Amino acid sequence: MRQAISNLEASRIREVANAGIGRTDVLAFWFGESDEVTPDFIRQAALDSLAKGETFYAHNLGLPELRDAVAGYMSRYHPRVDAGRIAVTSGGVSALMLAVQALVDADDDVVAITPVWPNLTAQPAIMGAKVRCVSLTSRDGEWMLDMDAVRAAVTPATRLLIVNAPNNPTGWTLSRPEQEALLAHCRATGTWILADEVYERLYFEPTTNGCAPSFLDIASPDDRLVVVHSFSKSFLMTGWRLGWLVLPPQLVEGIGKLIEFNTSCASVFTQRAGIAALQRTDEVTPRVVAHLKQCRDTLVPLLKQVPGVQVAPARGGMYAFFRIDGFSDSLSLAKRLVVEAGLGLAPGSAFGEEGEGWLRWCFASKDPARLREGVERLRNWLSAQ
């Protein structure tokens, strides 16, 4: 096996979850998904497709109908995105990996803004790249990005800058001036930007278009920019494995080749479900966002009332990222909370060494009462220490 693969760490989130397998008394908030099932009409679209016998290969880049629907959906929130720039993928994870495969060679210099979902730093490492990190910092109850540190890290030798905003796990979101500064700097250095914007619609700040700031709002089609999206979060479709890429025109043909060699195509019945989701997005996503905001506004104030807890409200996403005074080993702490408190959280170290000492709580709960019960379990456990 290649050394780069041998060096990969197993998921620390899974390691914690394994400690709770078979325990019905554990309140699990470790994975990044809602506990609400996909809406009926989306599931029915897939069933209808299967009933019609649509069990064959599709175009590598996706059904033309879905690419058109994605382009129409994107254009509601950003300057016109043409269907010719869309590639449908078997999930957001696959979209990210395809982008990295297309852009990164062994020994390339890659910079990532962290803490971040571990796949984003593992994928370029799999390709043999040298990954360097610029860490967000928590100041005065808010996550901040040191723009001077990013400018210093991204040089003409840097092949790719990876940015996830709204961010998993912190909820940090790039401002428009920060995006403009990053894009201008990467234009000057010739660096590609890989923007993971899968949480774009899960945004809680006042906005004119109902989503977080996107690089697509300020970039031209020919910029060195690849944007990743997914049906998973905004449409309650995590298990469907359906996503898409917005690409510069010059990359589309090559991405089609990579899809062929990775997955051939996304399944047709899954793509039919995606079309149905986009046709009725106003029935799904605004409700999901409103509910997530309710969940955030339930959880965060309660966490702030727990002695020793430091937490910053997330501007977007579905996570509270917090730390507890006196506990520096997040993996050990997360395991203890499962066993001793019946509370399942993700260790901050799963998101890079910059996340050590923190815990991630996914607040995408159908019943906010579970969040209140979880905080009570945390409070009681801490009182017994």
Image: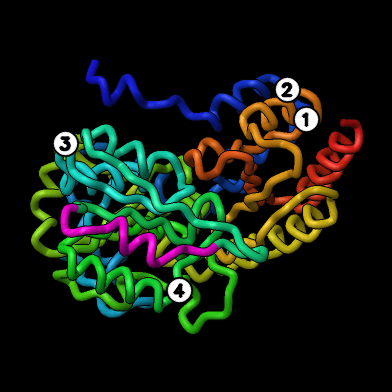
Q: Where is the C terminus found, in terms of image quarters?
A: top right
Mark 3 crowdedness (10 Å alpha carbons): few <14, some 14-19, many ≥20 = few
Give the alpha-carbon distance from disc 3 to disc 2, as whole Å. Answer: 43 Å
For image coordinates 68% across by 19% down, the residue present is 22
Discs 4/2, front = 4
Q: Which residue is mark 4?
A: 175
Q: Which residue is mark 2?
A: 23
Please identify the quarter of the rendering in which residue 216 is found: bottom left
Say if mark 2 contacts mark 1, CB within 8 Å: yes
Does residue 352 lie above or below 229 as drawn? above
Going by the numbered disc 1, the residue's amino acid type is: Gly
Question: Picture coordinates of residue 93 (x, y %)?
Answer: 35, 43
Q: Which residue is mark 1?
A: 342
Question: Picture coordinates of residue 332 (x, y %)?
Answer: 66, 27
Q: Which mark is residue 106?
A: 3
For image coordinates 67% across by 32% down, the residue present is 334
Q: Earlier in the sequence, mark 3 or mark 2?
A: 2
Give the alpha-carbon distance from disc 2 to disc 1, as whole Å. Answer: 8 Å
Residue 79 among magenta residues: no
Going by the numbered disc 2, the residue's amino acid type is: Arg
Please identify the quarter of the rendering in which residue 225 is found: bottom left
Report the front residue among 185 and 296: 185
Discs 1/4, front = 4
Give the alpha-carbon distance from disc 3 to disc 1, as whole Å. Answer: 43 Å
Does residue 253 lie above or below 7 as drawn? below
Give the alpha-carbon distance from disc 1 to disc 4, as whole Å. Answer: 38 Å
Going by the numbered disc 3, the residue's amino acid type is: Ala
Going by the numbered disc 4, the residue's amino acid type is: Ser
Span of residues in magenta: 144-157
For image coordinates 12% across by 64% down, the residue present is 249
Residue 148 among magenta residues: yes
